[in-house]
Amino acid sequence: MKTIFSGIQPSGTITLGNYIGALRQFTELQDEYNCYFCIVDQHAITVPQDKQELRKNIKSLAALYIASGINPEKSTLFIQSEVPAHAQAGWILQCNTYIGELERMTQFKDKSDGKDAVSAGLLTYPPLMAADILLYGTDLVPVGEDQKQHLELTRDIAERFNNRYNDIFTIPEVRIPKVGARIMSLQDPVKKMSKSDQNQKAFITLLDEPKQIEKKIKSAVTDSEGIVKYDKENKPGISNLLSIYSILEGTPIQQLEERYEGKGYGDFKGDLANIVVNAIKPIQDRYYELIDSKDLDDILDKGADKANYTASKMLTKMERAVGLGRKRR
């Protein structure tokens, strides 16, 4: 059975875009693959965090993973910092990564642009991300399009390590969903939906109240044409909403276009709000059952134990390959 690894940062409640682009597809994969799903809290501290808020977000994300359909009996769910091999392997891979490669990363350029000072971790976190993936012999990494560049660097680092030392890493493939890989902002539909957006109307979180969801969708930017038609180039706003509708209801976009022929954006947005509310409600119900339960801690403890066992074996291979420590008999 092939292995899948994926991680999400605990930097606030995850959005509808995260659910469609990541969590939703995870539930479909866990029956076919050996899945490791990680809350990458060490990545979160590349920018300043409030420690109490970070701890709250870690548990909240874990509960949302399970509420969204991740089955801990089928998949391994764990917190990155509870598996020390990630940071240790990240250092070894950092020593096999070039500064020029890191400086070319689009996300580093975007997050450091205009700032007087940025942490070194913001520049060097791609090797830690590579370690996250490579420690588990990962075959496939399901990601949105914005992470494709980091996965390409992970492949380069793994191949370089294999060629320079022992051939121990599986070279992972990128898995990007054909539809819904990149859900866009409701207020600026040429930008990805992001929980860090300063405009609260730009994104929907999985814990938003029904009235909030309805208000955000009804205020979503479209165009003056008033025709429900998919045209990503000329009508990015309504095209984004059509993608959300199509994925959550399971109806092809063409059928939706036919359904709303002759109708305005008001009818379309009202129906879409109901679709989103109904899709999110069972997730919210399960989330509130889990968030303060002992079950959640038990699941994370079990996941950390399994991840530690697997990751420590690969870390030992890495250390032997580069010559660290004493030779074991």
Image (tube, rainbow, N blue to C red):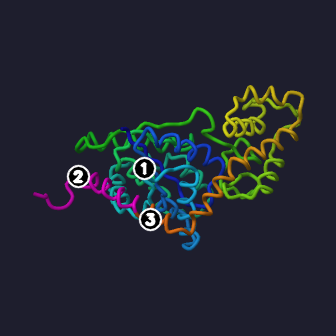
Q: Residue furthest bottom?
A: 52
> Which numbered disc, 1 or 2, marks the residue closer to the eye?
1
Q: Are marks 1 and 2 in contact (CB under 8 Å)?
A: no
Q: CA distance from mark 1 to mark 2?
A: 26 Å
Element on which disc 3 rests: helix
x 23%, y 52%: residue: 322
Residue where numbered disc 1 is placed: 36
Who is closer to the viewer here, 237 or 294?
A: 294
Which is nearer the N-term, disc 3 or disc 1? 1
For disc 3, the neighbor class at 10 Å (few under 14, some 14 to 19, many from 20) is few
Q: Is residue 133 above or below residue 196?
A: above
x 26%, y 51%: residue: 318
Q: CA distance from mark 3 to mark 1?
A: 16 Å
> Which numbered disc, 3 or 1, marks the residue closer to the eye?
3
Which is nearer the N-term, disc 2 or disc 3? 3
Residue where numbered disc 2 is placed: 322
Element on which disc 2 rests: helix
Left or right: 82, with 236 as reference point: left
Residues drawn in magenta: 302-329
> Which numbered disc, 2 or 3, marks the residue closer to the eye?
3
Q: CA distance from mark 2 to mark 3?
A: 36 Å
x 58%, y 56%: residue: 64
Residue where numbered disc 3 is placed: 298
Q: Report the magenta stretch's main SS.
A: helix
Rendered location of residue 212, percent (x, y): 78, 57
